[in-house]
Image (cartoon, grey):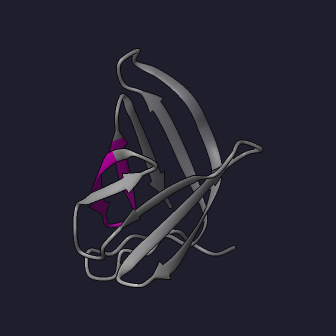
Amino acid sequence: MAAVGCDASSQSITGSATCKLTNTAAYAALYEGPCTGTQSESGANTIFEVKMGSAESFLFAGRKGETNWMTGPDPVQFTDLPDGGIFRWSTFALVVAQ
């Protein structure tokens, strides 16, 4: 089983992990369980795809080493962690961890 990891210098999320999606305005967990992540490059941008269960994937785009990302039209704050990362946008937070 591949591990998910985020690194400040390379920011990569790949393989199997555990995810928790929270509606921060309602203080409600919307999903907590296994997920997968993939990373691809598009020019100078990095695209992270996070898939949880049978739901549609979340796509996050940004530049390596930067904390400001996007998901669709929404700005995203990316926090790099030693064994994963946190994506925050609108009233949602997605934690991806090994």
Q: Nearer the viewer, residue 11 or 84?
A: 11
Q: Is residue 7 shown left or right of residue 61?
A: left
Q: Is residue 46 above or below residue 28?
A: below
Residue in the image at 68% along x and 46% along y: 56
Q: Is residue 28 shown left or right of residue 79?
A: right
Q: Is residue 17 shown left or right of residue 56?
A: left
Quarter occupied by residue 94:
top left
Q: Position of residue 72 (x, y in %)?
A: 46, 49
Q: Nearer the viewer, residue 74 or 98?
A: 74
Q: Main secondary structure of the magenta part?
A: strand
How many labels, in total? 0
Q: Position of residue 45 (x, y in %)?
A: 38, 76
Q: Is residue 68 shown left or right of residue 98?
A: left
Residue 83 in view in this figure? no
Residue 56 in view in this figure? yes
Does the magenta portion include 81?
yes
Q: Is residue 44 above or below residue 69?
A: below
- Residue lying farthest to the right in this orientation: 54
Does the magenta portion include 57?
no
Quarter occupied by residue 61:
bottom left
Residue in the image at 54% along x and 47% along y: 19
Q: Position of residue 39 (x, y in %)?
A: 53, 74
Residue in the image at 26% along x and 81% along y: 9
Q: Position of residue 78 (x, y in %)?
A: 30, 55
Q: Quadrant of the N terminus?
A: bottom right
- Residue lying farthest to the front in this orientation: 73
The residue segment tinted magenta is 75-88
